[in-house]
Amino acid sequence: MTTTSVTLSDSAAKRIAAILKSDTAKNAMRVSVEGGGCSGFSYKFDLVGDQAEDDLVLEKGEAKVLIDSLSLVYMDGSEIDFVDNLLGQSFQIRNPNAVASCGCGTSFSI
C-alpha cells in the first residue's frame, strides 16, 4: 500500500473531469515539475493518454492525475487546486516545500 503525498481539491477534480470529458483520446492530466520559471522551478500541466510505471496516480470522482516520481520529490505534501476568481481561472499548487513563488502561481523555489 502506498500513501498519497499529494492531494486533489474538489474544485480541481471537477475541472479536470470536465476537461477529460472533452478529449476522449486523453484519460489523465499529468502534473510535472521542470527547471525554469521566474523562481527556479515551474509546474507543467499536460493531458495524456498513457501512464508510466513510476507514476503516482490520484483519482477523485472522474478525475485522474499522474505525477512522475522525480516531480513528486518537489511536490510532496502539496495540494492541487483549481481557482476561479476575478483574476481568472487557473490550476494552483499549494506546495509547503516552496520557500518562494511568483505572482503567476506556476513558478516556485525550494
Image (tube, helix red, strand yellow):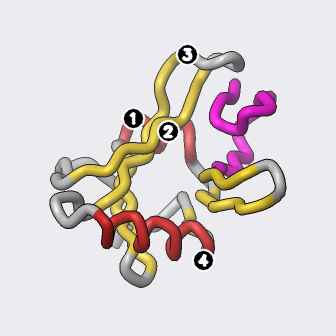
Rate crowding at label 1 as few (under 14), some (14 to 19) or many (20 or more) other CA atoms within 10 Å.
Answer: few
Say above or below: 29 vs 24. above
Q: How far apart are marks 2 and 3 (CA)?
A: 17 Å
Element at badge 2?
helix
* Label 2 vs label 3, nearer the camera: 3
Say above or below: 37 vs 86. above
Residue 10 numbered mark, or none: 4
Q: What residue type is labelled 4?
A: Asp
Q: Mark 3 points at which residue?
A: 36
Residue 37 in which image quadrant: top right
Q: Mark 1 points at which residue?
A: 70
Rate crowding at label 3 as few (under 14), some (14 to 19) or many (20 or more) other CA atoms within 10 Å.
Answer: few
- Residue 87 screen position, x and y as percent: 80, 49
In the visual, does 49 lie left or right of 59? left
Residue 73 numbered mark, or none: 2
The residue at 36%/49% (across/down) is 30
Rate crowding at label 2 as few (under 14), some (14 to 19) or many (20 or more) other CA atoms within 10 Å.
Answer: few
Q: Do the residues labelled 2 and 1 touch (CB within 8 Å)?
A: yes
Q: What residue type is labelled 2?
A: Val
- Residue 14 screen position, x and y as percent: 52, 75
